[in-house]
Image (cartoon, helix red, strand yellow):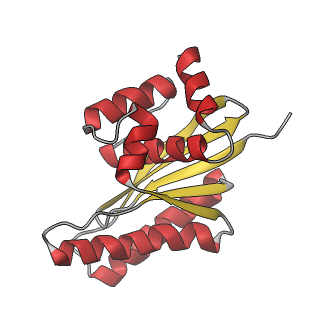
Amino acid sequence: MDEPVRIIGIDPGLRNTGWGVVATQGSSLTFMGAGTVRSDAKTDLASRLCQLHDGLKQVIDDWKPLEAAVENTFVNRDATATLKLGQARGIALLVPALAGLDVSEYAPNAVKKSVIGVGHGDKSQIQMMVKRLLPKARWDSDDAADALAIAICHSHHSGGGSSRVSAALRSA
């Protein structure tokens, strides 16, 4: 039987970067951990990016995932906010890459479609399905729940196809 594969999902944000780790083995999907790396809004941008880097590096060191999945950002009306989010996303891509992990990226609509079955939905729908797919899951922020959804999406798209998500739903 194959060894379990740990996947870290990352929901990038400058203030709060969510992370969630799941393990997949065959059609089994297991919750490992989730949390939020926070930066201090009272410090300069470079310091905040360092805080995100150091926090994500610690998470990867602690959980030892083999693969990473990061949500793509969307462009909003505030160009400055979009640029800052892009810088935080750069950290979310860089840290797992420096650790030697394969990093995949998923659009928000792809994550929603993988988890709730449609490309549009609100946070409560996503959290309800994450809880159903991972009954033991606990998270400390919406960002961490979103990160678990990103990890679930990656498990769905990386080798196991829809059988992983379907099997998890059947066993819930």
Q: Is residue 144 visible?
A: no
- 93 sits to left or right of 11: right
Q: Residue at x 38, y 41 (%)?
A: 112
- Residue 23, by quadrant, is top right
Q: Position of residue 106 (x, y in %)?
A: 46, 56
Between 12 and 39, the one lying in front of the other is 12
Which residue occupies the extreme top position in the image? 171
**130 lies above or below 57:** above
Q: Position of residue 7 (x, y in %)?
A: 61, 49
Q: Quadrant of the N terminus?
A: top right
Which residue occupies the extreme right position in the image? 1
Q: Position of residue 77 (x, y in %)?
A: 13, 69
Q: Position of residue 67 (x, y in %)?
A: 64, 56
**137 lies above or below 170:** below
Q: Residue at x 18, y 78 (%)?
A: 80
Q: Residue at x 36, y 76 (%)?
A: 87
